[in-house]
Amino acid sequence: MSRLFWLLVGAGLAVFVVLRGKQLLYQVTPRGVQDQVVEQGHRAAASFGDFVATFRAAAADREAELRRELNLPTATR
């Protein structure tokens, strides 16, 4: 019974190592690197878009606050 257990543990470990090895190998192939670069580019673009939207909203809020404090007419665009 103990030998069967260790045989199954070894087989399971072998399957895990092979599958994980394939994944790691794919990551260092040109196609895998390309996919990683594309994914990072999309994340960076999304982060930059979020930053710009936050910045514009904060700038508009601050402008409105200053106009209220200085009794200036609201800007029309």
Image (spheres, helix red, strand yellow):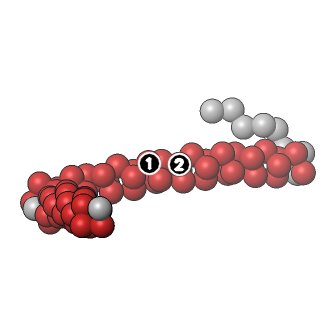
As drawn, 5 above or below 42? below
Residue 33 visible in rendering: no
Q: In the orientation shown, which residue stands out farthest toward the front?
A: 1
Residue 20 x/y as whole percent: 23, 61
Report the residue marked by disc 1.
Answer: 46
The disc labelled 1 sits on which kind of residue? Ala
Name which residue lies at 39% across and 56% down. Answer: 44
As drawn, 26 above or below 2? above
Q: Secondary structure at mark 2?
A: helix
Q: How many marks?
A: 2
Name which residue lies at 87% across and 45% down. Answer: 68
Residue 54 x/y as whole percent: 61, 49
Residue 26 x/y as whole percent: 14, 58
As drawn, 2 above or below 75? below
Marks 1 and 2 close (CB-CB < 8 Å) = yes
Q: In the orientation shown, which residue stands out farthest toward the left?
A: 30
Residue 32 x/y as whole percent: 16, 57
Q: In the rendered structure, find residue 50 and report the number of the disc placed on it.
A: 2
